[in-house]
Amino acid sequence: MTAQSTSAGEVALIDSVDRSVSSVRTRQLDISFNELADMYESGELIINPEYQRLFRWTPGAQSRLIETLILELPVPPIFLMETDENVYELIDGLQRISSYLNFRGLLRDEPPGGSPLILEDCDIVTELNGHSYKTLPLPLVRRLKRNFIRAEVLRKENNPRLRYYMFKRLNSGGSPLEPQEIRNCTIRLLDPTFNNVLLKLSADENFRFCIKTVADGQLEKRYAEELVLRFFAFKKGGTEYKHEVGDFLTDYMEAASAPEGVPKEVFDPALDEADFLKTFKVLRKAAETVNDEVGSRIFGSVDARGNIRGQFAVYHFEGFALGIQGLLDRLDPEDSEQMEALGKKILEIKKDPVLRQHTGGGKNTASAYRARVDFFAAEISKILD
């Protein structure tokens, strides 16, 4: 039998895979839960606030994890990242480690009120239900504390992009988290600068006024930051938008968080932040001139009769916020006459039956996005002609 020859292209591919494999620096540790608790308390194990906020297991799910540990049943490994300060940062295993710390009464700021977990819904040893850590018999406490978990440690020598992509894969499949929650956590492994910009601008008072129709539940899941990201992604790269919005936003955030440096055509902090702040100052000032009919409902959806509702409509957000970008230099939020004219135009646009052609279901394609922004831009420009 003749051995199958390997082409030059296949050799190059194999070499590329081998280089990536050889660049991975990991080690495995078996750590007791008691050691993990000690490391957490001493600051040697970091659960970043961005991650800890996402601790969502129900008391029943937490209780069954404690039951699993007491019964010495196997649990999946956790993943840690070694930092330059030689401490470990938890990057996968949040629910398991947080549940254990919560049962011990050690988890900072969780749950609200600071009450440690009391076991419930244990379904193998139901007699555990109703017990807290303090009421558990001492032999079971010792068994719980001495139980080990396998930890995969990413060494600090690893390339930031490699660590980022590993964490992204660990926290994407089957996750209950919203996309922006994952982005906010994972992007820190590349460079946190752009993410910090999103966090800062999402708190801007004019922006917050304009997005008052966003439900509280969405805001808790970082939708405000996602809207800031959406603004910059489409402002800077809207012509490149061709596919699913979530992937487009993630791709832009990665490009704007490159550890080796971000080109100004991708994100220019001074210019782009100023444009963002002026955009929402202009929109707020204009909307407030027709406060009874628009006001903080500037991005509110519109029913078939043209009535503005209190339900946030992302296509209205895109249309107004991005539609004025080519006109921004000609708009002055301190010009009351101009803002009044813009306010009337905003109300006119929202009541225009043509608007329904550019918003609503199935309008997230690239062509629909461009047509939508062009429509808003053309209508708004009429007050400047």
Image (cartoon, rainbow, N blue to C red):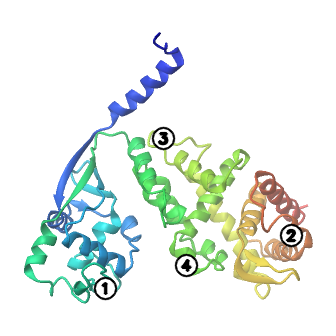
Q: According to the image, label 3 marks what residue?
A: 261
Q: Which amino acid type corresponds to the residue marked 1 in the rendered image?
A: Glu
User: Residue 212, how many percent across, how many down?
Assistant: 64, 79
Q: CA distance from mark 2 to mark 4?
A: 27 Å
- Residue shown at the point (87%, 80%) measured from the top left: 304
Left or right: residue 280 versus residue 304 is left
- Whether pointer 1 and pointer 2 mark residues with C-beta atoms closer than 8 Å, the reply is no
Label 4 or label 3, whichever comes before in sequence order:
4
Q: According to the image, label 1 marks what residue?
A: 120
Marks 1, 3: nearer the viewer: 1
Q: Is residue 273 above or below residue 294?
A: above
Q: Which amino acid type corresponds to the residue marked 4 in the rendered image?
A: Gly
In the picture, the quarter occupied by the C terminus is bottom right
Q: In terms of secondary structure, where does tag 3 sit?
A: loop
Q: Which amino acid type corresponds to the residue marked 3 in the rendered image?
A: Gly
Q: According to the image, label 4 marks what residue?
A: 217
Label 4: how many Cα within 10 Å (few below 14, some 14–19, many 20+): few
Marks 1, 4: nearer the viewer: 1
Most distant residue in the front direction = 1
Q: Specify whether residue 192 is in view.
A: no
Q: In terms of secondary structure, where does tag 1 sit?
A: loop
The image quadrant that residue 303 belongs to is: bottom right
